[in-house]
């Protein structure tokens, strides 16, 4: 929040700052306006004394007006008007006494009502103070409402991102548990046990990560290695993974588990369809101010319409989930493209802003 907004948001600090500055400004303007009339120090003293009395007399108005804001409009107008007029009368009396006792050295008017001479001028000044008070008060209320709206919007945005992110866990878990169940039915207990162990490590990583926060790519690579170890238990030598990770990209921030659904999709619709197995290539490179992530396979491929795979080839929520998460996190500053990989297969490209974690500890691989 900018400094001036912090000042406006702090009621105590703002009131005393503007209250004092306003009356100092009154004294300066009044003295400049009457500079040619009298340049003696005694006249300056009277002006300062009048400004100080105005400073003191308007302090109670703050608490009266604060109470007035809780009343009905009619009662508020009556209370504000009466308080304004009464304060102006008192200030007029004080100013005239200061002027006659100090500047005119004991002058006394013939009629009592002369003590309230120039009440109109006092009303104008106190009226300006009142207008300024309510103006700033309304601005504070608008600023507070704006902050509440932004906070509510941010909370809703974060809840949406969390929802999208947590959809991945049951989606992945369902597929893996099915595979473990199949292994158990086939009495391949050791293989099933290995998958359960790796699944436990992967889910621990998945659940430990805050869906709102982005993590360094090196941590995502570690998570993908855990996931691929699970899949290699099933596919053994049929699954080949080629990594091409540019060194400077390892500290780049990415949404957690953003690549896992893509790799899962490649395994389900590419590797599993090839009797001799297949290859998945994963790369990360920088291009200007962007981070380019690429996942491709050499499977049989699929029909692509308008940059999307048919529903039956999208692995359920997987790829659509990624697009929704990227939209929620980066709005328009990203790209998500699905295309054919030559000579065969599917290629998925993701472009997001290249950002590096300021916390060096974030770059460490977590076990």
Image (spheres, grey):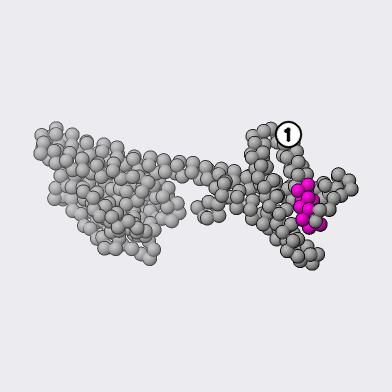
x, y (%) of residue 157?
Answer: 44, 44
Q: Nearer the viewer, residue 199 or 253?
A: 253
**Where does the magenta region start and end?**
93-104
x, y (%) of residue 103?
Answer: 78, 58
Q: Which residue is mark 1?
A: 74
Taking the image as shown, residue 6 lies to the left or right of residue 313, namely: right
Image quarter for residue 90?
top right
Which type of secondary structure does the marked residue at label 1 adopt? helix
x, y (%) of residue 290?
Answer: 37, 61
Taking the image as shown, residue 247 lies to the left or right of residue 291, namely: left
Q: Give me the residue at 14% from left, 41% from top.
A: 194
How packed mark 1 is, by other alpha carbons closer than 10 Å (few <14, some 14-19, many 20 or more), is few
Q: Is residue 71 visible?
A: yes
Q: Give me the residue at 60% from left, 48% from top.
A: 15
Q: Main secondary structure of the magenta part?
A: helix
The answer to if 206 sits in the magenta stretch is no
């Amino acid at each position: 929040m900018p400094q001036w907004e912090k000042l406006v948001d702090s009621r105590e600090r703002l009131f005393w700052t503007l209250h004092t500055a306003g009356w100092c400004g009154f004294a300066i303007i009044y003295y400049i306006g009457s500079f040619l009339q009298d340049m003696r120090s005694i006249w300056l003293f009277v002006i300062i004394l009048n400004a100080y009395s105005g400073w003191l007399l308007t302090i109670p108005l703050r608490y009266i007006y604060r109470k007035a804001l809780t009343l009905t409009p009619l009662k508020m107008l009556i209370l504000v008007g009466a308080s304004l007029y009464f304060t102006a009368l008192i200030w007029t009396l004080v100013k005239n006494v200061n002027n006659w006792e100090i500047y005119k050295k004991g002058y006394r008017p013939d009629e009592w009502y002369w003590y309230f001479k120039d009440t109109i001028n006092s009303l104008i000044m106190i009226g300006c103070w009142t207008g300024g008070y309510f103006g700033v008060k309304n601005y504070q209320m608008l600023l507070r409402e704006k902050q509440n709206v932004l906070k509510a919007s941010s909370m809703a945005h974060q809840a949406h991102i969390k929802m999208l992110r947590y959809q991945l866990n049951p989606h992945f878990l369902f597929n893996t548990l099915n595979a473990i169940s199949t292994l158990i039915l086939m009495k391949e207990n050791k293989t099933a046990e290995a998958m359960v162990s790796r699944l436990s490590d992967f889910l621990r990583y998945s659940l430990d990560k805050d869906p709102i926060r982005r993590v360094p790519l090196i941590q995502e690579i570690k998570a993908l290695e855990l996931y691929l170890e699970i899949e290699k238990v099933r596919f053994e030598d049929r699954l080949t993974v080629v990594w091409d990770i540019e060194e400077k990209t390892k500290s780049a921030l990415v949404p957690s588990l953003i690549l896992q659904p893509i790799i899962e999709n490649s395994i389900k619709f590419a590797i599993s369809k090839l009797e001799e197995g297949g290859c998945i290539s994963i790369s990360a490179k920088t291009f200007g101010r962007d981070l380019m992530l690429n996942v491709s396979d050499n499977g049989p491929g699929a029909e692509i319409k308008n940059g999307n795979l048919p529903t039956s080839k999208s692995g359920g929520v997987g790829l659509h989930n990624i697009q929704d998460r990227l939209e929620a996190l980066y709005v328009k500053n990203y790209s998500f493209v699905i295309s054919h990989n030559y000579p065969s297969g599917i290629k998925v490209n993701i472009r997001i802003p290249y950002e590096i974690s300021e916390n060096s500890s974030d770059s460490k691989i977590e076990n």
